[in-house]
Amino acid sequence: LADEINRATPRTQSALLECMEEHQVTVDSDTYRLEEPFLVIATQNPIETAGTYQLPEAQLDRFLMKICMGYPEKDGEIEILNRFLKASPLTSVESVCSKEEVLKMQQEAKEVYVHPSLMGYIVDIAAATRKHSSVAIGVSLTMVNAARAFAYIEGREYIVPEDIRILAEPVFAHRLVLRHGLTYQDNRNALMQTIMESVEVPTEDWGK
């Protein structure tokens, strides 16, 4: 967990590239594999800019998703207040599953079926980002595994177009490199919505 990763220096940020992509670290020519399941979760403070460093495109691309948390609903905020009235719930946090269970779920998610038409749909979306006049560099084909995992969580053995549409912003938007200084995440999200509306959604029977 890299908390407020944009406060890390560029050299420190670059040190994460190998472990994020290859799940290994290299020190003095010695390579060490990282124990699975390994992943990097990072946070950013979207308000403060003093003492921060913008993440390079190569590192942003290694994050499968970028999710803006926002604020809880009123009932959620009241629940947060109630939790901290008498004690800190952080002191009693327990794991909800084992490492072995996570590895098993990862393997099961890989069995989720992807219809050939949806493969084409993902490629069409990626191509549309590359052709858009406001985009300098379009997205990579990183959607399939995310959509498989989402369908698995939803209890399905196959993905549907709506899975891709729901995941388009968190999976694709932060990967867009825009022209003319349009660098804010809000610009990327709005542009991704526009691009999704321009790509025809296939209609098929999505099961095997």
Image (cartoon, rainbow, N blue to C red):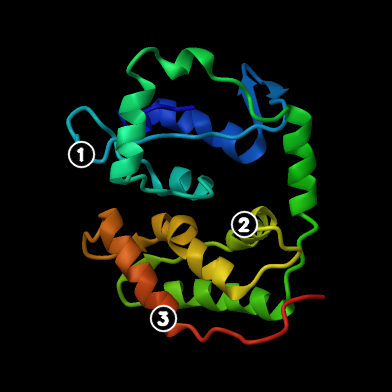
Q: Position of residue 190 (x, y in %)?
A: 31, 67
Q: Position of residue 107 (x, y in %)?
A: 79, 47
Q: Callout 3: helix, strand or loop? A: helix
Residue 96 shows in the view: yes
**Quadrant in which the C terminus appears:** bottom right
Three-letter amino acid code of the residue under disc 1: Ile
Q: Callout 2: helix, strand or loop? A: helix
Gap between marks 2 and 1 measured at Cα: 30 Å
Q: Which mark is residue 66?
A: none
Residue at 77 percent of width and 67 percent of height: 113
Residue at 77 percent of width and 75 percent of height: 207
Q: Callout 1: helix, strand or loop? A: loop
The residue beneath circle 1 is: 47
Question: Tags 2 and 1 in contact by the CB under 8 Å rule?
Answer: no
The residue beneath circle 2 is: 150
In front: 10, or 35? 35
Residue at 76 percent of width and 54 percent of height: 110
Where 162 sits versus 39, above or below? below
Question: Tags 2 and 3 in contact by the CB under 8 Å rule?
Answer: no
Q: Neighbour class for label 3 at 10 Å: few (<14), some, many (≥20)?
A: few
Q: Earlier in the sequence, mark 2 or mark 3?
A: 2
Q: Earlier in the sequence, mark 3 or mark 1?
A: 1
The residue beneath circle 3 is: 197
13 sits to left or right of 190: right
